[in-house]
Amino acid sequence: MKYLRVEDAIKGFVGYAKIEGIINSEVANSKIANLAYDNRKKAYEYLKAHRAFDKMKPLLTNDNLYVRLCAATKLLNVYEEEALNVLEDIAKGEAHAFVAEMTIKEWKEGNLTF
Amino acid sequence: MKNRISKYLRHLTLMFILVISVNCEKEIAEPNIGTEVENTDFKLNQGTFNEMFKTPMFKKGFLETMEIKSVLQKINYANKTGKKDIYDFTIDSSTIKQATINKITSFSMLIKRKETNNSFFENLAIKIDSLGQTKAYLIKYTYTSKPTYNPDHNSKSFEGTTKVTTLDPKLINNESGKIQHECTSLYSLMCNNDGKGNCNGSWHPAENNCNSCIVLKQSGISCGYYDDEAFNLGEGGTTNTSGGGDGTNNNVGDEDLDQLVVVPVDCKDCALPVFEDDVFDVETIAIKLELSIAEADFLKTNNSLLIDVANFLIVNNNSEGENFARNAIKVLINGYAKEKEVASALLKGNTDLAMDLLLEGAEVPNYLCPNPPCPEDVAEAIIQDVVVTINNAFDGELNILIMLHDYFLLDLATRTLKEGAWAKRILEEAGADISSDVSLWTLGELFKVRIRGRKAYVEPANQDLWDTMSDVGTSIFDVAVLASPIKGGGAYGLLVKTGGSKITAASMVDFLKTYKTIATTTLQGGRGYESFYLLKKAIGKLKAKDGHALHHIVEQNGHQKLNPLKFGKKNIHNTKNIIEIPTGAETLHNNVTSHYLRKFDFTNGKTVREWISSKSFQEQYDYGIKILKQEGWDGIYGIIK
């Protein structure tokens, strides 16, 4: 998928994050999950290249929990406080808590790349 | 008179003691290596090129130096001097040494050229002053006599001259293309630690582990080694500096004289230089080797053998070398045809041919399976030594194998390389796939080759390594893999760091013990086995119960299959690291396995399996437990009693 507009990349980011979230909680299919991950990454690369972090920021309050998680992860180095709050909330819950917890841990240890 | 002093200073002779290892065991007299300078405010650091390049100062200095080099090369080409390009060199990335003194830092590194000449070695030095200005130099260390090797100290000492050439486009004469000489006052950081914490060993270029035994020595004033006529790599390095210099910087004692502090980086795997005095005639050799008249006559009538023996003695100028040459001549007179071929090959330094001949038809036990996957019931033995039985053609009157044993007694540096070559050959003969990036030197450090009867053994280099390998459950093949920069799963960097810029048996022991300690603490109370097969056999589960699988919490293979190597097989195949859980579609086992194949943002887009491979045993274990619980494990089910 090649993006030409920020809006399309945002849609792609959200769509693929939703797929990942479903697979994470519903089926153990690493191939499909990784395909979704790779596509979401492409959308993020486009957004990053266009410095469209402000356009990503609303995703921190998206209805879908995994979209919130993915957006928060990618915005940690831009909107650290807000992003960490989102991740900490998810980590306290049940769904995707493990991924959120690991993300916070790796961020605090300085291991995340963007 | 002034000219004579100047000439003397330009050709100042230095005595260096270069040490290949710091395991100095005996005290020797301190050589004259220059004047000690009172200044204790210096720092030393060393690392590989990749490690040093991570530091902003080295990165800046190196990139600027490469710019300077590029400009100089262009000027050189533009002038079409037709001479060899002194700027055409590559960097030996294995060791970069950094010296910092009075806010001035220098980095020195060995450089290599397409045409090698063993009569000297060269360093590129990059100086960065307190204002951040970069200046680059070529330093040439030329042997003036044959280095002598002291096996007790594992050190080489030699007399030599140093010449420093400043790499500066401004010093190039635009008309002639010749470089003008700038005089540099050269200082060297030397060290005399004896490997036991005392500062009374032999002097050698400072290294990281020298601690408080480092001293700054003035190495004299050098006014460049290069001029258009004199520099010729094919003919050997010259110390002739006549014709150069602009006269402005040659005034010794001038406060403005350029100063450079370095730590020499010598060439450890280069052959020793050959000097005219080393050449022998038949009588000299006969006396030296105490040959019988018949043996001397044999040598006299065989000119090519005479040359081989003379060359061999030049390179191996010690009692072990003489002993070997003496035995070789006896074999060449009385031995079997094949023995003669081996003796001749070894005298010529053709160890590959000698190995081919020796291992032709050799018997290697066929129970080894060094490269998994292997059949479980035959491949699980932890092999800590490898034996080959050399064929019957070598059962001659003068046993070629005894001669070979002597061959290994040659000087330690040579022996390490030769032993490494033999170990590699024998391990490969046994079926191991030794990675090409593992140097012969490293293999020689880690393993020893022993000849007993008609059998050749490759064993761990010392008892400590052997014991540690047994304790952790690491095979000789595993150790060879860990030493690989590419296949060693990150072990290489740690091994080199603890080994003082090279892999040693001691650094391997430290590495294995460290991981064992971490793993053993994590698995307290567990029972470890040297293989999965042995564990299954011991717990009576050669086959897991229906619908179940035995699951390793810290993966038994993992990314690049390195976990058993890094953490020890007994910790991987441990009752505390294995649980019996349901397997099949949408079961705990499948979900966990699938998770390890997933990519996440917190793994930076790597699969979990790849990402976790760089973590410690404890971290891998904790993660494994966490994901099991995440997928519904109650923390009790399937635990092995």
Image (cartoon, rainbow, N blue to C red):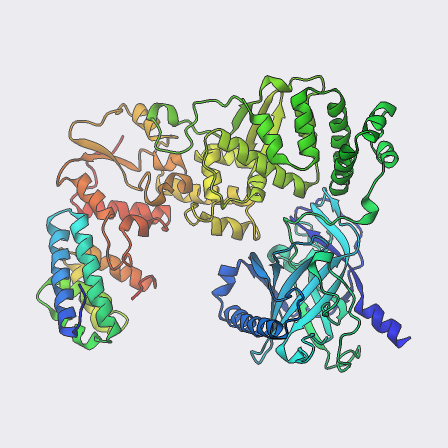
Viewport quadrant of the C terminus of chain B: top left
* Residue at 75%, 27% in the rendered image: B327
Relative height, residue B619 to residue B532 (above, below): below
Q: Relative to B27, is B75 above or below? A: below
Q: Is residue B361 visible?
A: yes
Q: Which quarter of the figure has residue B308?
A: top right
State the image coordinates of residue B541 (x, y, percent, origin top left): 26, 25
- In the image, residue B455 lies at what x, y percent? 58, 22
Q: Quadrant of the N terminus of chain B?
A: bottom right
Q: Looking at the rendering, which quadrant does residue B587 occupy?
A: top left
Residue at point 66%, 46% (across, down): B23
Looking at the image, can residue A88 be seen? no
Q: Is residue A17 above or below residue B357?
A: below
Q: Is residue B585 left or right of residue B73?
A: left
Residue B430's spot in the image, x, y percent? 48, 28
x, y (%) of residue B489? 41, 47
Q: Foreground: A85 or B403?
A: B403
- Relative placement, left or right, of B194 versus B63 is right
Residue B535 image-quadrant placement: top left
A20 vs B343, nearest the viewer? B343
Question: Which residue is nearer to you in this view: A91 or B126?
Answer: B126
Residue placed farthest to the right in the image?
B1
**How many numbered marks does the figure carry?**
0
Residue found at x 24% / y 47%? B597
